[in-house]
Amino acid sequence: MSLIENFRNIFKIEELRNRILYTVGILMVFRIGTYITMPGVDASMLVQSTGRATDLLGLFDMFVGGAFARAGVFALGIMPYITAAIIIQLMGAVVPYFQKLQREGEEGRRKINQLTRYGTVLITLVQSIGFAINLLATQGDAIIVSNTAFIINCMIVLTAGTVFVMWLGERITERGIGNGISLLIMIGIIAALPTNFMNEWNTKDNAIIVIAEIVILVLVTASVVLLTQGQRRIPVQYARRVVGRKVYGGTTQYLPLRVNAAGVMPIIFAQSIMFIPSTFGQFFPGNETVTMLTGWSSDFTGVAYNIIFATICVFFTFFYTAIVINPKEMADTMKRQGGFIPGVRPGKQTVEFIDNILTKITLPGSIFLAFIAIMPAFAANFGVTPGFAMFYGGTSLLIIVGVGLDTLQQVESHLMMRHYDGFMKSGRIKGRRRM
């Protein structure tokens, strides 16, 4: 069946069609909001004086769809929510109260989500003050109200904007297709691609160089897809059981362990941490001491920035994998269902075997993930314009690939449930078996 026919099948399913249209509508609302300038700011003067270098704040601006540079009502975007979620997850590993909530199932998840929302409001209030102080120092001519009024205005408007964006993301997750929070970040990143590509095209005199850069970008993207989809399958044998007149088990299945089980979360965690020094620096824009201490975090091509960034990526890959995958729970589930790994005794030895395999595949996966994370620095140092270099790896490319594959998986699941062929008949989106 042709790819065009598969697209037609998507819109033949009423529920899937409605979900996709609903998602597109929400994304359009988000994109419109990024162009609405905050009250108290002269947008014309801001546009004339905008043109800062593509530093770490430029990367943040790309995550929020350009609203940061335009002083939009969505200037902080969804990033405070991501930061709050990271803090809650870290506390879940060390604080007994949060560990208890994680074990309470759906009720615990609701409480955690509520605490994350409260944390988002608090973080946004703090970041909005830093945003206001930084804008007064760098774009003071564009501010048409008093400094105090503008800071209060930023606290109210930016907090309301972030809460609204958070609500939009939750609506996509509930009634749309894909993970809403991730899609909002991805759409902001993709929106910057055409402009950055045209800047790269206009900068280079030789079209062959641009074509070579595109080829390299495609190869890097393919490697990220392989990393995202790669897995180690462990054979699991199930003993034959007779229940009444039916025979269960007696078959061999596979336990899939992904090379990058943590997905895009480690690099989002790491990027959020790298934003902290720059956020702190916004409160003291004219202080030379603070600039000296936090300056390294503003240059994504710097050696210190990339070493720290890569190290944090490796750490969070192991940390988040340990949270997502529990070898003991896997071993207990297999034992209850009468399953065992050939050559390995059930119980403690199975736990150690799974943990050993998980460590062996997570280590190279985390190193490769860290390398992809710092690829934009290499691209920029080889002459690619900083804006276009962001798409050669790092958070941008991993989010685009990870969120894109996750959304396609959900679309494919809807197609398969209605007995249609998958969205990609020969692909490995779902890792389905060949019949």
Image (spheres, rainbow, N blue to C red):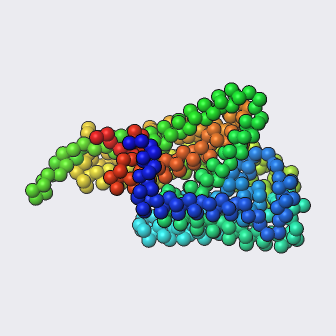
Which residue is drawn at the image coordinates 77% and 58% (left, top)? 70
Q: Nearer the viewer, residue 161 or 30?
A: 30
Residue sticking out furthest to the left? 245
Q: Splitting the image into 4 quarters, where does residue 314 fall?
A: top right
Query: Horizontal and vertical percent for residue 165?
Result: 62, 65
Counting labels gives 0
**Residue 293 falls left or right of residue 109:** right
Query: Horizontal and vertical percent for residue 239?
Result: 19, 47
Quarter occupied by the N terminus: top left
Residue 236 is at least partly visible in this image? no
Which residue is drawn at the image coordinates 49% and 47% (left, top)? 405
343 relative to 83, above or below: above
Residue 243 is at least partly visible in this image? yes
**Residue 272 falls left or right of residue 13:** right
Q: Nearer the viewer, residue 266 or 136?
A: 136
**Residue 123 falls left or right of residue 236:** right
Query: Horizontal and vertical percent for residue 190?
Result: 63, 49
21 relative to 238, above or below: below
Q: Splitting the image into 4 quarters, where does residue 303 fall?
A: top right
Quarter occupied by the C terminus: top left
Query: Horizontal and vertical percent for residue 12?
Result: 41, 57
Q: Nearer the viewer, residue 74 or 381?
A: 74
Which residue is drawn at the image coordinates 50% and 58% (left, top)? 20
Q: Nearer the viewer, residue 122 or 101?
A: 122
